[in-house]
């Protein structure tokens, strides 16, 4: 199992707010991996660092074999990204935008045409091909952003809350699409609040809390770490582990052990699986 994304000891602060505190993470090639965590845990910050939208204060990130600090352009050829809130050029039609996305990614005209036809069919957007992006609904825009992120057939697709705003039929198609991609050994890396979705969709997840990796692995591994039993849902496991992490973090802060608080909730990074 090779890693396509490796984060090692990532720190990031926004002025007074310490968003990431030594985050470690490993995403394997060919899996659907989920990043889950409470509001403010640092999920979006981590994704933005990986795609190059934010600079980390400290740490090391490798994507598809590239050190992203040393080779900031090369690795992006292999990445597609859909942010939590998509912003599209309203003055283009759906088709114009996808052609434009394909061209700036260096995709051949034939492949652009083939992929546009494919994604419009998958996302049920054929009827909107010539429509201005301005006139699409929020869910439709989300689907267009996904098609745009996939136009160059990237090794790694990163999505921040990919299913929010998409209707159930659309969600089903997105999940099918992700499953098709991992069959081709491509990787899908999502951040989500929807634990039931993460449980059904992702082979492995990382639970992050206050900027650190509390635990990562498949559900079985997390059930065993949290001692919640083999029937526990990801939600039950999540609640137990984040609660423990919160208590340990608070204890460490109250006892004045700022080092412990910032560098390890009871050694909470419990290893990868
Ligand atoms: P959510 O699940 O609510 O989307 P998240 O896990 O994605 O949260 P982040 O958005 O990464 O969390 O935020 C981590 C912390 O950093 C939070 O305390 C947040 O308030 C803070 N933060 C994020 N962006 C900024 C910013 N641009 N300026 C200042 N603080 C920020």
Image (cartoon, grey):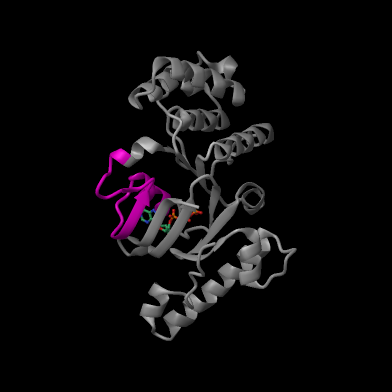
Q: Tell me which residue sits at (48%, 20%) in the image.
A: 94
* Residue 70 image point, x, y percent: 24, 49
Quadrant placement of the C terminus: bottom right
Can residue 235 be seen in the rendering of this structure? yes
Q: Give residue 59's quadrant in the image.
A: bottom left
Left or right, 108 with reference to 160: left
- Is 234 in the magenta? no
Left or right, 215 with reference to 74: right
* Residue 104 image point, x, y percent: 33, 25
Can residue 93 be seen in the rendering of this structure? no
* Residue 93 image point, x, y percent: 45, 17
Please tell me in which quarter of the rendered image ligand 1 is found. Answer: bottom left
Is residue 225 depicted above or below 216 in this figure? below
* Residue 62 image point, x, y percent: 35, 51
Is residue 257 depicted above or below 139 in this figure? below
Question: What segment is highlighted magenta in the picture?
Answer: 45-74
Task: Tell me how many marks there are.
Answer: 0
| Furthest-front residue in this view | 1
Q: Tell me which residue sits at (55%, 51%) in the image.
A: 34
Q: Give residue 18's quadrant in the image.
A: bottom left
| Furthest-left residue in this view | 70
Is residue 115 depicted above or below 233 in this figure? above
- Is 57 in the magenta? yes
């Amino acid at each position: 199992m090779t890693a396509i994304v490796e984060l090692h000891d990532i720190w990031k602060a926004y002025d007074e707010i310490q968003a990431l505190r030594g985050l470690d993470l490993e995403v394997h090639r060919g899996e659907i991996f989920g990043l889950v965590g409470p509001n403010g845990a640092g999920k979006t910050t981590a994704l933005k660092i990986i795609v190059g939208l934010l600079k980390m204060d400290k740490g090391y990130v490798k994507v598809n074999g590239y050190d992203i600090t040393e080779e900031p352009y090369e690795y992006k050829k292999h990445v597609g990204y859909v942010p939590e809130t998509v912003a599209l050029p309203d003055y283009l039609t759906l088709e114009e935008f996808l052609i434009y996305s394909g061209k700036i990614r260096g995709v051949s005209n034939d492949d652009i045409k083939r992929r546009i036809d494919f994604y419009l069919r998958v996302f049920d957007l054929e009827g909107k091909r010539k429509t201005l992006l301005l006139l699409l609904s929020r869910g439709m825009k989300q689907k267009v952003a996904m098609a745009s992120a996939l136009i160059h057939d990237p090794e790694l697709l990163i999505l921040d809350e990919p299913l929010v705003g998409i209707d159930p039929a659309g969600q089903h198609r997105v999940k099918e699409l992700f499953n098709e991609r991992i069959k081709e050994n491509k990787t899908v890396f999502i951040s989500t609040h929807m634990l039931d979705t993460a449980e059904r969709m992702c082979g492995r997840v990382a639970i992050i809390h206050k900027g650190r990796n509390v635990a990562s692995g498949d559900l079985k591994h997390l059930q065993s770490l949290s001692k919640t039993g083999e029937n526990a849902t990801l939600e039950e496991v999540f609640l137990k582990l984040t609660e423990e992490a919160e208590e340990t973090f608070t204890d460490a802060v109250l006892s004045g052990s700022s080092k412990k608080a910032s560098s390890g909730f009871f050694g909470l990074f419990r290893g990868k699986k």
